[in-house]
Amino acid sequence: MANIKEAQEEIIENFSMFDGDMEMTIGYIMELGSKLPEFPEELKTDENIVKGCQSKVWLSADLIDGKVVYKADSNTAITKGLVSLLLTILSGQDPDDILSADLYFKEKIGMNRFIGTQRSNGFAAMIKQMQIYALAMKAKA
């Protein structure tokens, strides 16, 4: 499993192929979302909804062998793709690494060009929720 920096570098490299083409970039993000594993229906509860997202985003976390493993889903294709980027980077990592992660990939792929303010706020809310889960898992460990 790649560490947080390696996962971000891979994402940056993948996005560089689109050379700023908005349509292709958004298509790729939606494709990433379509590849997320099925999210269990029983986890689609109010307590698993990420607050601050315009779309519905469900997020859950488990501690497996000392690593935080996230599951997520959304009711919109783009948001599902965005959360899949975060899962690629943060799922399966040590809680301390998640809490101290510098998520620089957003700037490097020019995310602010293709997601608006609302989605940007929602994306920040997803990151915050993942960090809250990591903190809880760290306390549990």
Image (cartoon, rainbow, N blue to C red):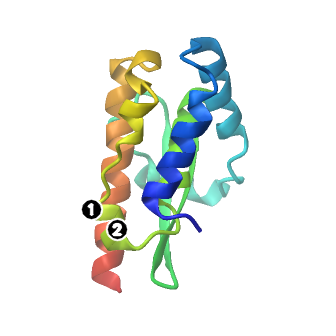
Question: Looking at the rendering, which quadrant does residue 74 occupy?
Answer: top right
Residue 49 position in % (x across, y down): 44, 47
Query: Which secondary structure lies at badge 1?
Result: loop
Q: Is 26 situated above or below 11?
A: above
Tell which of 141 and 85 is nearer to you: 85
Is residue 35 found left or right of 48 in the rendered image? right
| Three-letter residue code for mark 2 | Asp
Residue 118 visible in the displayed image: yes
Where does the image place residue 122, in percent across and percent down from the top left? 37, 33
Which amino acid lies under the numbered mark 1 shown in the image of this protein? Answer: Ser
Residue sitting nearer the eye, 117 or 102: 102
Where does residue 107 sit, x and y in percent of width and height? 36, 31
Q: Which residue lies at the image location 27% right of the left edge and 80% below the top edge?
A: 139
Q: Is residue 127 left or right of residue 91?
A: left
- Is the C terminus in the top left, top right, bottom left or bottom right quadrant? bottom left
- Crowding near pointer 2: few (<14 within 10 Å), some, many (20+)? some
Give the number of marks. Answer: 2
Instruction: Residue under label 1, please give it.
Output: 100
Numbered tag placed on residue 51 in the rendering: none
61 and 21: which is toward the camera: 21
Residue at 35% across / 22% down in the picture?
118
Contact between labelled residues 2 and 1, with CB atoms less than 8 Å apart: yes
Task: Say which of 28 and 118 sits in front.
Answer: 28
Distance, label 1 to label 2, CA atoms, is 5 Å
Q: 10 Å neighbourhood of mark 1: few (<14), some, or many (≥20)? A: few
With respect to residue 50, does 120 lie above or below?
above
Which residue is label 2 attached to?
97
Residue at 44%, 59% in the rendered image = 4
